[in-house]
Image: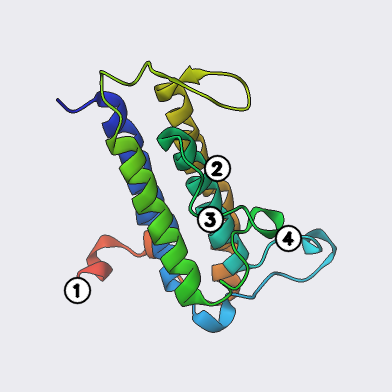
C-alpha cells in the first residue's frame, strides 16, 4: 500500500527536479562559476555552488531518513565534495541526490513511519525526519531564486518561464 506521506515527499522532489534541475541544465557550462559583482554579493555562492549546495542538503537529509551516512560529505561550506566544479559534475550530483532522496522516501510506509530514528535532537519518528526532505525541497527554492537571477543576468531564459506553446515548438 502506498503511503500518502511517501507520495507527498516524492511530489516535492518532483518540483525540485522540474524547476531547479531544469535550470541547472539550462545554464551554460562556462557560466557555472558566475556570481554577480558588487558589495551585496561578496560572499554569495557561484551558480555551480548553488546547485551543489542544494544537492548536498538533499543528500544529508535523505541519509538521515535511511539511517546511514550520506554517500557524500558536506564539503566546504556545505557545497559538497571538492572537485565537482563543472556543469556536468554538478548536474549529475543534483540528479543523483534527487534519486537518493526518492529511494529514502520510497522506503516510508504506514508500518515504519512512526519508527524512531536517531538524530542529533534525539529519537524522532521516521516521518518527522523525512519532513526534512520537505524542508530542503522548499529551501531549494531559496537557491533557485538566486539561480534565476544569475541565469537572467547571463541571458538565459529559465525553462519554467518558457510558455507551454514554445516548449512544443509552435
Tag nearer the camera, 4 or 3: 3
Label 4 vs label 1: CA separation? 38 Å
**Residue carrying label 4:** 44
Q: Residues within 10 Å of mark 1 (few under 14, many from 20)?
A: few
As drawn, the residue found furthest toward the right would be 39
Q: Residue 151 in the image: state x and y as whole percent.
A: 54, 69
Q: Residues within 10 Å of mark 2 (few under 14, many from 20)?
A: some
Q: Looking at this view, is 168 or 102 the one in front?
A: 102
Disc marking residue 125? none
Above or below residue 163? Residue 89 is: below
- Residue occupying the point 50% across, 33% down: 132
Looking at the rendered structure, the number of numbered marks drawn on it comes to: 4
Looking at marks 3 and 1 on the same chain, the residue that comes earlier in the sequence is marked by: 3
Q: Quadrant of the C terminus?
A: bottom left
> Does the residue at mark 4 contact the one at mark 3 (Cβ under 8 Å)?
no
Residue 77 in view here: yes
Q: Quadrant of the N terminus?
A: top left
**Residue carrying label 1:** 170
As drawn, the residue found furthest toward the left would be 1
**Residue carrying label 2:** 139
Label 2 vs label 1: CA separation? 34 Å
Q: Residues within 10 Å of mark 4 (few under 14, many from 20)?
A: few
Looking at marks 4 and 1 on the same chain, the residue that comes earlier in the sequence is marked by: 4
Residue 161 in view here: no
Amino acid at each position: 500500500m502506498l503511503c500518502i506521506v511517501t507520495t507527498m515527499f516524492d511530489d516535492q522532489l518532483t518540483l525540485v527536479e522540474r524547476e531547479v534541475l531544469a535550470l541547472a541544465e539550462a545554464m551554460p557550462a562556462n557560466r557555472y562559476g558566475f556570481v554577480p559583482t558588487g558589495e551585496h554579493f561578496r560572499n554569495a555562492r557561484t551558480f555551480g555552488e548553488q546547485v551543489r549546495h542544494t544537492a548536498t542538503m538533499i543528500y544529508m537529509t535523505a541519509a538521515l531518513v535511511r539511517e546511514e551516512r550520506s554517500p557524500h560529505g558536506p564539503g566546504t561550506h556545505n557545497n559538497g565534495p571538492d572537485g565537482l566544479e563543472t556543469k556536468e559534475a554538478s548536474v549529475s550530483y543534483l540528479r543523483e541526490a534527487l534519486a537518493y532522496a526518492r529511494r529514502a522516501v520510497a522506503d516510508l510506509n504506514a508500518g515504519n513511519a512512526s519508527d524512531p530514528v536517531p538524530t542529533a535532537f534525539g529519537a524522532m519518528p521516521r516521518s518527522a525526519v523525512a519532513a526534512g526532505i520537505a524542508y530542503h525541497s522548499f529551501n531549494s527554492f531559496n537557491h533557485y531564486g538566486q539561480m534565476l537571477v544569475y541565469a537572467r543576468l547571463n541571458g538565459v531564459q529559465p525553462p519554467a518561464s518558457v510558455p507551454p506553446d514554445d516548449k512544443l515548438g509552435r
